[in-house]
Image (cartoon, rainbow, N blue to C red):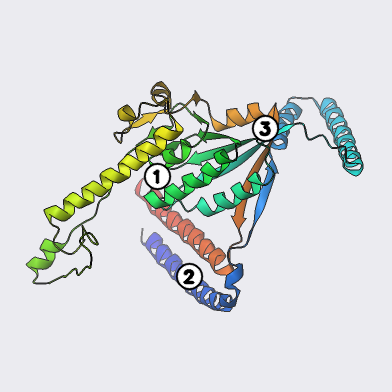
Amino acid sequence: MEFLTEYGLFLAKIVTFVVAALVVISVIMSAAQKDRGDHEGEGELKIRKLNEKYEKLREAIQARLMSGPQRKAFHKARKKLEKAEKKAAKAAKDTGEQDDSRSRVYVLDFDGDIKASDTDPLRRAITAVLSVADPEKDEVVIRLESGGGLVHSYGLAAAQLDRIRSKGVRLTACVDKVAASGGYMMACVADRIVASPFAILGSIGVVAQLPNFHRFLKKNDVDFEVLTAGEHKRTMTIFGENTDKGRQKFLEDLEDTHGLFKEYVSERRPDLDITAVANGDIWFGKRALEVKLIDEIKTSDEYLIEACDRADVVSVAYQRKRTLPEKLGLATSAALEHTVWKVLGAFRNQKFQ
């Protein structure tokens, strides 16, 4: 046990030194890049054709099941086919006779946190897709995962999806795990919502909570004053004394926000009994289908694999280029996490031996 303690202290010293060095480097690089502020938001679109991804998976399993000679013949035939396809595509491009009759399914991803931080990449990806999507035959699929968060943040994220519908392009939301509260606000924009059997949906409600330290400060003879111009400028406060009048106004604001939320959902899903589902409760996939929060039980993988049979399925994602300080920060975080778990694992193994 003494050896493990010394080993842990040794690792802690090394980590401290590495972190200090990285912080110094990060500060220097951050200062050096201040003049490049106009380029911080630059990034690039990542385009990937999912038909090829699923086709490669199928071919990989097929090849594994073949004998040696069969596998060799299979790969030879596959290379010959790929060569012929590339030649045909090049010829069509040169002659301007490319076949654009096949529809496309554009796949976007949104992984939501409390601030809906993925909104800006989503906005850029939607802008790119709408510049080429054909409302007559194309579709957009949003793979959505979010438990909700700030009202104004998710309001903007949902408004980005509304852009797709306003252009007349069919929109499908796929929910594998959760689309609740602000997440469901986004999902309800879609023409069709598809969810896995145990995905969490709903939570059409509004919540606000904050601590109050007024009694603690008063007990310790600390005065805290809140000065406002405007009757409702600050209805609730963390350090000051909250009044019944201020609390009532705060509740009225919550009710108003809840009303707007319900109106938003009702407009986009008119067949939904909003009174029955807008109580803040959640439903798992199968139950959500019964109350019409969703339209179909299916995973996103199943939906996209089926789409590959009828269309070109293309994943579109906007990725902002990280600055060097950000990369160093991520590297530091990963190194610290790895070290902590390694030390804890050593102690845990010692304990249970």
- CA–CA distance in space, label 1 to label 3: 32 Å
Pick whichever, 239 or 139, lies toward us. Answer: 139
Residue name at image x 61 percent, y 40 percent: 107
Which label was assigned to residue 216? Answer: none
Residue name at image x 42 percent, y 52 percent: 153
Quadrant for residue 341, please give it.
bottom left
Pick whichever, 172 or 137, lies toward us. Answer: 137
> In the image, what residue type sits under mark 3?
Glu
Q: Position of residue 347 (x, y in %)?
A: 38, 54
| Precedes in sequence: disc 3 or disc 2 | 2
Instruction: Read off the residue under disc 1.
Output: 148
Residue name at image x 54 percent, y 78 percent: 31
Element type at mark 1: loop
Q: Is residue 248 above or below residue 233?
A: above
Q: Are marks 1 and 3 in contact (CB under 8 Å)?
A: no
Pick whichever, 266 or 49, lies toward us. Answer: 266
Q: Nearer the viewer, mark 3 or mark 2?
A: 3
Crowding around mark 3 (Cα neighbors within 10 Å: few <14, some 14 to 19, many 20+) is few
* 56 with respect to 5 (left or right): right
Q: Position of residue 23 (x, y in %)?
A: 49, 73
Residue name at image x 50 percent, y 40 percent: 144
> In the image, what residue type sits under mark 2?
Val
Element type at mark 3: loop
Q: Position of residue 25 (x, y in %)?
A: 54, 75
Quadrant for residue 241, please give it.
bottom left
| Precedes in sequence: disc 2 or disc 1 | 2
Instruction: Read off the residue under disc 2.
Output: 19
Element type at mark 2: helix
In the rendered image, is residue 150 in sight? no
Which label was assigned to residue 136? Answer: 3
